[in-house]
C-alpha cells in the first residue's frame, strides 16, 4: 500500500508531499534557495535515529514516469499487446519506451508462442531450399542464388506482432475447406516467424494406426517491414504469390494468383500419378478393384479444379466431460473403397455422434456417419457364437425393436399430454409428466452407468464370419458394446437412411462399428495431435458449428 500511495503522489508520511514540492523548487530555483527541510524537522528526524543508525533511504518515486526505464520495460511487457497502443498515447516517454523490441518479443512469445530469435536464420518451417530458391541468372548453372527470405537483421518484433500475428490472428485454429463432398482438415498455426496453413491427411489406407500426414497450403510472413506477404504452397514449384481474404467471422478464403505453378511438365497424367502416390501411396496398377479406381479418378478430377482457391469455415474440438465413455476428439476411420476418413466423436447426453470432417460421394463431409445409443448396451455372446453373423444380427435387431417401442411409447405419451393440455388439465398434468420424463432419463442414465460398472474390463472379440474389414489387424479384446445406427446412402447422397449396427469400444484410443446391412466393419483410431486455438468458447457454439457444417452438404 505504501508503494502504491507513493506512486499515486499521496505518500504515507506527513512531510512526503512537502519534501517533494521543495525538491522541485530546489531544481528550478537559485542555488541559495532554502534547504529541503527546516531545522525543526531535522531535529525531530535526528532524535528518532539511535546512535550509529543511518538515515532513512530516499523516498520512492511519486509516479510511473520517475521509475527507471528498465523497470517500465518489464511492466509494459507484461501487458496484453492490444493495450500497448493506448498506452503509447499517454505521453512521449511511454511512446519512446514502447519502441523497445524486448517488450514486443515477450508479447510474441507469450501470446503466440514465437520463441525464435530474429537475428538467426534457423527458422521452423523454412528449409535451405526456401532460403536460396532462385538463381539470379537461370541460364548459368554455377550462378549465384537469389535470397528470397526477408532480411531479419533489420526487422523488429513490433512489426512481427502488429503486421503479422495480430493482423491474422482470426485465422488461427482448425478449419474445414469447402471441397464438395470431400471436405478436409486445415490447421493454421504460428510456425517460427510464419503463419502456415497445414492440410492434415489421413495415413495411407488401410494403416489406420499410423500418424497423420500433412502438407502446407499457404504461408504468411513479412518480406518487408510493415508488409505481410501471402504465398501459395500448392504444387511442386515452391512458394508463389497468393491472397487471403477474411470473408466474415469464422470464415476466410484463399486464392492463388499464379496457378501455372501447379502444373507439371508431363501434363495431367504426371499430375495424377504424383497425386495418387501422395494420396494413396501406390500406383493405379496396384489397385485392382475397378470401382475403387473410378472413385480415385473422380476425386482427383473434382479436387484439382479448385487450384487451392478455397473457402474455409471454422471447426471446434468437441468439449469433454468427466463421465464421457472416452475422451472425445478426432479419429481416423476405414470406409471401404473410399479409404481412410476423418471423423469427430462428440457426446450429447445419452447419445454419442460421429461427424465426418472428410467425406466421399456417398456420405459427404459434415454428415453424421454414426450415432451411438449409450442407454442401450449390448452384451456380446461367447467367442464361438460371436463368429456367427446371424446370432449377432439377432441380438442387435432385438435391441432395435426395443428402442423402437420405447420411442413409440414416448411419442404416445407426448400426444396424450398435449391432448390433456388442450382440455385445460395442463396444471395437473405438467408436473407429473416432468417427473416421469426425468425419472425415465435417470433410469436410462443409471442403466448405462450400471452397464459400464458391471461389464468386465475386457472380453474377447472377433469379427463374425462374412463381415468385411479393410484392416485385419484389429484388436482382439474389447471393453463395451452399444447399440447404434450408421448412415448409408447411394452415390450423390441419394436415399440416405440410418441402419442398425453395433459400436465396439476397444480402448481409450480405438473403437469400431459393424454395419449390419453392409456386413462391413470400420475401425477408428484417435488422431494424436495437440491442436491449438481449437477449443469451443461454449457448448452452444460447438452445437451451432455442427449444425452449420451439416447444412453445407444437406
Image (spheres, grey):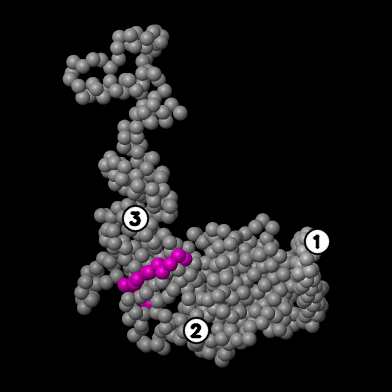
Q: Secondary structure at mark 3?
A: helix
**From the viewer's perspective, is the residue at label 3 or at label 2 nearer?**
3
Badge 2 is on which residue?
299
Mark 3 against mark 1, which lies toward the viewer? 1
Choose top left, top right, bottom left or bottom right for residue 29: top left
**Looking at this view, is 492 or 386 the one in front?**
492
Question: Mark 2 to mark 1: distance in Å?
Answer: 60 Å
* Res 71 → quadrant: top left
Screen quadrant of the C terminus: bottom right
**Regarding mark 2 in the picture, which secondary structure is present there?**
helix
In 3D space, how far apart are the residues under numbered discs 3 and 1 (Cα atoms)?
64 Å
> Badge 3: few (under 14), some or many (20 or more) residues near its Cα, within 10 Å?
some
Q: Which residues are magenta?
A: 235-250
User: What residue appears at the point 79 percent right and 83 percent down from the top-left corner?
Assistant: 390
* Nearer to us in this view, 22 or 469: 22
Q: Earlier in the sequence, mark 3 or mark 2?
A: 3
Q: Earlier in the sequence, mark 3 or mark 1?
A: 3
Tell me, yes or no, whether the two marked residues, 3 and 2, touch with CB atoms within 8 Å: no
Number of marks drawn: 3
366 to the left or right of 99: right
Instruction: Say which quadrant the N terminus sits in.
Output: top left
Q: Evaluate whether residue 324 shows in this view.
A: yes
- Of 452 and 543, which appears nearest the observer? 543
Q: Nearer the viewer, mark 2 or mark 1?
A: 1
Eyeballing the image, is 65 above or below 443?
A: above
Q: Which residue in the structure is indicated by mark 3?
A: 162
Amino acid at each position: 500500500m505504501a508503494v502504491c500511495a507513493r506512486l499515486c503522489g499521496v505518500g504515507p508520511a506527513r512531510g512526503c508531499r512537502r519534501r517533494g514540492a521543495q525538491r522541485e523548487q530546489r531544481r528550478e530555483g537559485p542555488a541559495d534557495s532554502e534547504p529541503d527541510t527546516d531545522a525543526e524537522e531535522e531535529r525531530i528526524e535526528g532524535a528518532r535515529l539511535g546512535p550509529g543508525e543511518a538515515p532513512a533511504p530516499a523516498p520512492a518515486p511519486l509516479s510511473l514516469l520517475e521509475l527507471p526505464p528498465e523497470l517500465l520495460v518489464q511492466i509494459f511487457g507484461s501487458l496484453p499487446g492490444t493495450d500497448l497502443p493506448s498506452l503509447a498515447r499517454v505521453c512521449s516517454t511511454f511512446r519512446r519506451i514502447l519502441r523497445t523490441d524486448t517488450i514486443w518479443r515477450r508479447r510474441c512469445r507469450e501470446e503466440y508462442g514465437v520463441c525464435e530469435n530474429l537475428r538467426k536464420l534457423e527458422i521452423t518451417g523454412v528449409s535451405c531450399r526456401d532460403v536460396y530458391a532462385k538463381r539470379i541468372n537461370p541460364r548459368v548453372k554455377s550462378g549465384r542464388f537469389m535470397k528470397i527470405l526477408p532480411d531479419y537483421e533489420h526487422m523488429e518484433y513490433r512489426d512481427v506482432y502488429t503486421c503479422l500475428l495480430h493482423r491474422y490472428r482470426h485465422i488461427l485454429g482448425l478449419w474445414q475447406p469447402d471441397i464438395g463432398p470431400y471436405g478436409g482438415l486445415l490447421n493454421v498455426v504460428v510456425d517460427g516467424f510464419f503463419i502456415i496453413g497445414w492440410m492434415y491427411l489421413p495415413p495411407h489406407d488401410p494403416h489406420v494406426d499410423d500418424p497423420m500426414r500433412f502438407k502446407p497450403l499457404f504461408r504468411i510472413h513479412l518480406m518487408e517491414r510493415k508488409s505481410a506477404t501471402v504465398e501459395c504452397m500448392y504444387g511442386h514449384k515452391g512458394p508463389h504469390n497468393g491472397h487471403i481474404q477474411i470473408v466474415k467471422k469464422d470464415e476466410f478464403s484463399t486464392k492463388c494468383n499464379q496457378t501455372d505453378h501447379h502444373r507439371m511438365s508431363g501434363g495431367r497424367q504426371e499430375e495424377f500419378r504424383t497425386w495418387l502416390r501422395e494420396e494413396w501411396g501406390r500406383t493405379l496398377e496396384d489397385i485392382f478393384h475397378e470401382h475403387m479406381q473410378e472413385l480415385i479418378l473422380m476425386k482427383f478430377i473434382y479436387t484439382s479444379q479448385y487450384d487451392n482457391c478455397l473457402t474455409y469455415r471454422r471447426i471446434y474440438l468437441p468439449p469433454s466431460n468427466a463421465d464421457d465413455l472416452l475422451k472425445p476428439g478426432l479419429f481416423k476411420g476405414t470406409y471401404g473403397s473410399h479409404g481412410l476418413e476423418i471423423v469427430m466423436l462428440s457426446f450429447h447426453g445419452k447419445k454419442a455422434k460421429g461427424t465426418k470432417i472428410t467425406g466421399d460421394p456417398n456420405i459427404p463431409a459434415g454428415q453424421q456417419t454414426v450415432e451411438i445409443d449409450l442407454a442401450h448396451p449390448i452384451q456380446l455372446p461367447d467367442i464361438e457364437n460371436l463368429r456367427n453373423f446371424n446370432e449377432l444380427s439377432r441380438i442387435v435387431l432385438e435391441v432395435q425393436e426395443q428402442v423402437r417401442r420405447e420411442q413409440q411409447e414416448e411419442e404416445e405419451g407426448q400426444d396424450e399430454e398435449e391432448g390433456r393440455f388442450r382440455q385445460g388439465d395442463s396444471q395437473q398434468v405438467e408436473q407429473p409428466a416432468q417427473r416421469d420424463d426425468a425419472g425415465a432419463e435417470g433410469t436410462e442414465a443409471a442403466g448405462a452407468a450400471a452397464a459400464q460398472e458391471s461389464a468386465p474390463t475386457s472380453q474377447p472379440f472377433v469379427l463374425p464370419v462374412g463381415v468385411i474389414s479393410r484392416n485385419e489387424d484389429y484388436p482382439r479384446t474389447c471393453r463395451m458394446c452399444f447399440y447404434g445406427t450408421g448412415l448409408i446412402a447411394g452415390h450423390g447422397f441419394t436415399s440416405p437412411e440410418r441402419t442398425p449396427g453395433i459400436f465396439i469400444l476397444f480402448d481409450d484410443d480405438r473403437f469400431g462399428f459393424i454395419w449390419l446391412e453392409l456386413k462391413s466393419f470400420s475401425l477408428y483410431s484417435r488422431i494424436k495431435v495437440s491442436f491449438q486455438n481449437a477449443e469451443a468458447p461454449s457448448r452452444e457454439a460447438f452445437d451451432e458449428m455442427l449444425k452449420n457444417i451439416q447444412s453445407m452438404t444437406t
